[in-house]
Amino acid sequence: MAKKLDIRRFPGFLPVTYLCLFLLYAPLIIVMIYSFNDSNSITNWGGLSLRWYVDVFWGVESEKFKTAAMNSLLIAVAAAITSTSIATMAATAMLRAGKFRGKSIGFALINLPLMVPEIVTAVALLIFFSMIGFTTGYLTILLAHIVFCIPFAYLPIAARMQSIEEVYEQAALDLYASRLDAFRLILLPLMTPGIISGFLLAFIISLDDFIITNFVKGAGIETLPTAIFGAVKQGIKPNIMAISTLLLLVSVVFVTLSYLVGRMGQNKK
């Protein structure tokens, strides 16, 4: 009987793992710690304080950040709902429609945005909107986010659907249910954990996006990531660390929820 491969026993595996974790998370931890700094300096420690979190909500620049956060929230909700709906239909077609011409090409096109550098996608969308005469603004941001979020919503939905055996739908069809009823009453409820997971993932991808948004947003329109970038260009202030920490916590919460919902669906399979 062949022994199971345990990469943890490879020489140097643990040091490399710890180094990668340190490089990934040490900067985030430093930002979180210094967001509680009482000093006006971002490098000198002046004691624990919540003054910069108070400044985020009631300070001089609070209205700008509140407007940007509301823009981000509304766009993220709309983009997540639309991209999740499209991803659900795409997963149903790819995994439940049997073999059809162009299926492999369709699968490649759905996953292509995950492999293309985001800056290339941003430039391509900007050129496309300019060619068709779209004025950059809220609509172009929403359309760009929908396109970019579809693959992220598709992955957990497709993974959930692949784990559902087709015998349930076949049993419904044998009991004289229509294909629409079999989908609506059998497949869709079983897919719900994957759909919710895909929605949460698409939401946080849209909420955190900067590169694509910065290219297609137009003048005078800001989302929270672009507002943070604009503030950083004038010099890093401690309140930026507080905003970054809040945005990081929101991202962690939604990614964790997406993971837990996906796991819940797998456990109840």
Image: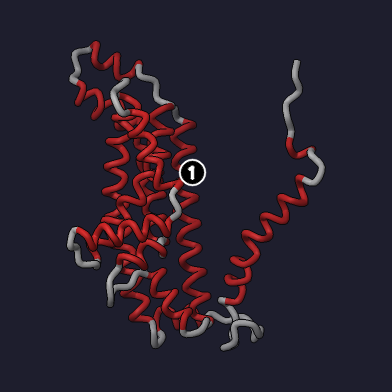
In this picture, residue 3 sits left or right of residue 64:
right
Q: Quadrant of residue 29?
A: bottom right
| Most distant residue in the top direction | 174
164 with respect to 50 (left or right): left
Amino acid residing under circle 1: Leu
Residue shown at the point (24%, 11%) measured from the top left = 174
* Residue for point 67% across, 55% down: 21
Q: What residue lies at 41% left-to-right and 55% top-to-bottom?
A: 205
Q: Quadrant of the N terminus?
A: top right
Residue ranking furthest to the right = 11
Q: In this rendering, does residue 193 appear at all? A: no
Q: Position of residue 2 (x, y in %)?
A: 75, 19
Residue 214: x %, y % from top left = 36, 68
Question: How many labels, in total?
Answer: 1
**Is residue 218 at least partly visible in the picture?**
yes
Q: Which residue in the structure is indicated by mark 1?
A: 260
| Vertical relation: 268 (above or below) 196 | above
86 or 267: nearer the viewer: 86
**Residue 113 placed where, x, y %?**
40, 47
- Which is nearer the eye, 59 or 110? 110
